[in-house]
Image (tube, rainbow, N blue to C red):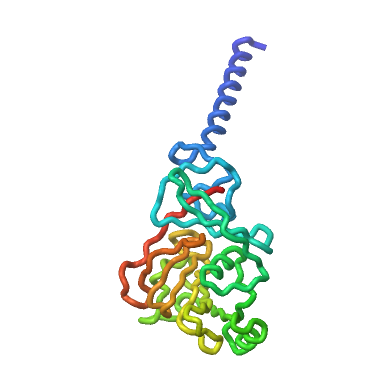
Amino acid sequence: MNKKFFFGLVFVALISLSSCDIFARDSSLNSSGDSFSTSQTDSSHPNTSSGNPSTSTSFPVDEYHDPYRILPQLSSDGESADIYTVSWNGSSYVGEYFDTYYIDEVYVDYEDVALYYLAFETFPVNYFPNNNYGKEEAMKQYGDDGRLWSQYRKGDYTGPNSYTESLGIFNNSRGTYYELDIDADGYYSVYDRRRARLVIVEEGITDYGFMPVVYYTDDHYSTFIEFYNYPGGWSDTFGGTSHYEPERSPAYTVSWGI
């Protein structure tokens, strides 16, 4: 073989290997050039994670955002879900164990119901469809803890009593949303459902991608707060059917670890 041709092939091979090494190292950097664990989620892509915390000790380099939210904390086995509250420790977002939720337990508090739905992607066992049969079963099986849920599609209600426009832009213009009854004053029954509701936009809104977004109203849709997917994580109050100011502002989705 011609010596010049042989050494030329060697040179090309060395250049190719060097390029691969550079690419491999660059793939471990985020958009700002800071390294992060591959078990973490890039917060600029909020729908690429299961929503469960990483056990890695290498947290993504981030900065504090106000307000901030996290991805839904999903059950890994469909039977239970470890839930974490998430806070800023001065350099990263860190989760602290809060509680374990179980698929077959009763939940009535609005935050518990929100966390349960996001973890298991269904309603607690004590919730029944809002119809005559559902009311009877809720009372028969769970008594005072029996609750109802209702299903609607965007556009079912219009005019001054429509609140869906205040929640953000639905990914699906005829998307499904749910209303889950909440006992906010101690006088709830399935025959007197009172004024409090948890509202769930099933296919999400354009601010966050296609995961569900949860809201709470205690005054029959006049005002709302938005859930940020961790215990204690709620927005400031914004207007629903009322002209309450300020209007809703989206939160920044952050990555976190434990």
Quadrant where the N terminus lies? top right
Q: Is residue 39 above or below residue 240?
A: above
167 or 115, nearer to the observer: 115
Report the front residue among 134 and 167: 134
Residue 4 x/y as whole percent: 59, 11
Q: Residue furthest top?
A: 3
Residue found at x 44% / y 81%: 157
Residue at screen point 36% across, 72% down: 239
Q: Residue at x 52, y 75 (%)?
A: 178
> Is 198 rendered above or below residue 22?
below
Where residue 21 sits, quadrant-wise, is top right
Q: Quadrant of residue 126?
A: bottom right
User: Where is residue 243 shown, x and y percent of the image?
Assistant: 31, 75
The image shows residue 165 at horizontal and vertical percentages of 39, 72
Question: What is the x, y in percent for residue 234?
Answer: 44, 64
Rendered residue at 57%/84% (across/down):
130
Query: Could you say which is closer to the camera, residue 246 or residue 231?
Result: 231
How many numbered badges does the structure rendering display? 0
